[in-house]
Image: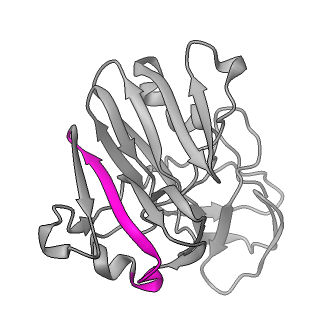
Amino acid sequence: GHVYSSGDYTPIEGATLSTGGGVEVISIEDGVYLMALPPGPVSLTISVIGYESVTKNVTVTEGVPMVVNVEMTPDGIVFDLGPGWQLSSTPVQPVNPDIEVNLAQILDKIESVWAYHGGVWFVYDSATPDFSDLWTIEAGNGYWLKLNDAGSFMIAGSAPSKSMELISGWNLVGLNSEVDIPVEDALQSITGKYVSVWAFKNGVWQVYDPAMPDFSDLTTMEPGYGYWIKTSEACTWIL
């Protein structure tokens, strides 16, 4: 059997298929399965990363090919961005990290997307995509997005790694969590190794200074936002 996309009929990456009644399902490759289904009613459950699982009851007739069509509901993170500069991140690792796939719903509103990895800037420019060097959206990274109008989009994916390597100096990162965390708790694993944390929310800069927490206006790290973390040494950030 196969789990196909209705669009291009290619096997769906990350799809799994299971049945009730203890029938063994052997996965040969992504979207391709081998199983021995007895004639009669069978309950099939189809799961794809980034979508809600679907269970469908079917009747198997010996010697008769069967096609099961299901409509799957996306299960992802929704982003609502205003016009201008936005400092964002994704708290899930996208099923497909391609930047144009993830931002397809607002691609006509995006002027550019910037990332900063290992001390180097990377950019996706919608006007000259062939000259861009930023082609993926990954969990754990922060991104500057310049929009000419407000827009919403959704990213579907799986839980990312809770460990991230930071260089000495400035790091543009995201929070790999789907819940808010107090700054001090979120950065507990690198206590004494970071100088400050900056966020840009609703057009306003906020900062957390571990040396002066009472005078800081950034108190919580939230999923979906990007953050600048300045470290005093290279370290591993573990949530």
Quarter location, residue 127: top right
Viewer-proximal residue among 49 and 46: 49
The answer to whether 68 appears left or right of 102 in the picture is: right
Residue 198: in magenta span = yes
| 179 vs 230: above or below | below
The answer to whether 79 appears left or right of 217 in the picture is: right
Residue 60 location in percent, x, y? 69, 63
Quarter of the image that includes the N terminus:
bottom right
Viewer-proximal residue among 27 and 77: 77
| 164 vs 105: above or below | below
Q: Which residue sits at x=72%, y=18%?
A: 130
| 79 vs 191: above or below | above
Quarter of the image that includes the C terminus:
bottom left
The answer to whether 72 appears left or right of 1 in the picture is: left
Residue 220 location in percent, x, y? 23, 68
Residue 42 location in percent, x, y? 61, 71
Q: Which residue sits at x=30%, y=62%?
A: 222
* Residue segment shown in magenta: 188-202
Quarter location, residue 131: top right
Residue 37 visible: yes
Residue 201: in magenta span = yes
Residue 40 location in percent, x, y? 65, 71
The answer to whether 173 appears left or right of 199 in the picture is: right
Instruction: Report the residue that reaches farthest toward the top.
Output: 127
Q: Which residue sits at x=54%, y=49%?
A: 70
Residue 51 visible: no
The colour scheme applied to this rendered structure is one colour
Viewer-proximal residue among 239 and 43: 239
